[in-house]
Amino acid sequence: MTTPRQTSTFVDPPRGSGPAWERPGARPGLRVAGATPRSIRAATAEPAWVKWLLIGTALAFLTFFLFVPLAIVFAEAFKKGWDVYLAAIVDDDALSAIKLTLIAAGISVPLNLVFGVAAAWCIAKFEFRGKNVLLTLIDLPFSVSPVISGLIYVLIFGLQGWFGEWLRDHDLKVIFAVPGIVLATVFVTFPFVARELIPLMQAQGTEQEEAARVLGANGWQIFWRVTMPNIKWALLYGVILCNARAMGEFGAVSVVSGHIRGMTNTMPLHIEILYNEYQFAAAFAVASLLALLALVTLVLKYLVEQRMKQGPQASSGRHPPRGLRQQTGKAGSAAAA
């Protein structure tokens, strides 16, 4: 009794020399004779010296262009002592700049939050004419220089602009005042929230919202109990980036502010004026405060990133929201009745 001939899953090595995985005739998907997992890893792995060279280059770049300048800012800020540092921070002009910076960020960030959620909802959940145009407009601040955007506001709301005479007749002031600073800040920061939410909401699809609608939920219930829990960490991430850009914006605000000390100077503009007046200790003191805010922003950004990575694992197998379960039960009872 003869046993049936077994077919091998290995490709017969052709004639010739050379590594097994380079031999002609080896088809993708089939193992090549002599090609062990270790040899395949060795072929695709980088030598140790290449890894250390790349790591060292990255660390050197970060050291010279990030860590050293940051250390210099704090060293120069405290160079003349704590008293000089504190005096520069509590100066009337410095306090006014800090207050204006917080006002501009406090107004622009909530506005961009509302706009970003609405724009992401429309783009990710609906199909309509002009969708690509809306996406292009959202990306406009990324491609237009902030100085150009500030100049546009001057041409529109300035004394020689389109609405200049009307604003002057009604005793309203936009340029060289707080409204112009807020408008410039809103323009340069409004893509951040929308651009964080759009890819996430597109990837999530509309199945959960459609299921909630079938269960009888209204629009607000769908948004707060289905959509918002899925996007809350990405939304917070976008808000952090938006707030960081709002506090550190220089170009657009510099054009529309007028550099009026104690009135229209934000923290970056106040630092520039102090440095140009050779008040280096005061300039570095205010700069250290702005850098400290940036470091806090980075820490918050890192924490949110970690929470976003844990989000998909935590949300797997999640049950429907309690409100929808209760509403489903009511709907089932009504149907049974």
Image: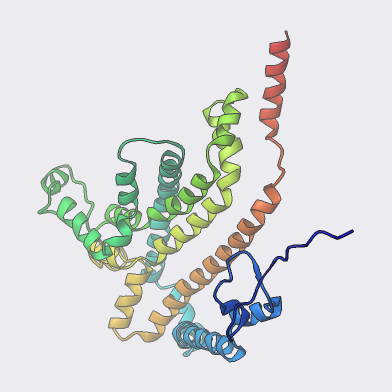
Across and down, in percent, residue 66 comes to 47, 82
Across and down, in percent, residue 269 comes to 32, 71
The N terminus, quarter of image: bottom right
Question: Which residue shows up at 18% across the image and 51% down it?
Answer: 157
Protein image colouring? rainbow
Instruction: Give left or right: position of 176 versus 269.
Output: left
Query: Total label count?
Result: 0
Q: Of all residues shown, which one is farthest toward the right? A: 1
Question: Which residue shows up at 35% across the image and 76% down it?
Answer: 271
Q: Nearer the viewer, residue 90 or 276?
A: 276
Q: Of all residues shown, which one is farthest toward the top? A: 337
Question: Which residue shows up at 40% across the image and 44% down it?
Answer: 115
Q: Quadrant of residue 184?
A: bottom left
The C terminus, quarter of image: top right
Q: Of all residues shown, which one is farthest toward the front? A: 1
Q: Nearer the viewer, residue 203 or 183?
A: 203
The correct choice, above or below, for 167 with respect to 17 in the image is above
Instruction: Give left or right: position of 263 versus 329.
Output: left
Across and down, in percent, residue 26 comes to 58, 71
Q: Nearer the viewer, residue 205 or 140?
A: 205
The correct choice, above or below, for 285 with respect to 110 in the image is below
Question: Which residue shows up at 36% across the image and 71% down it?
Answer: 268
Instruction: Give left or right: position of 315 versus 207.
Output: right
Across and down, in percent, residue 282 comes to 40, 81
The correct choice, above or below, for 230 with respect to 60 in the image is above
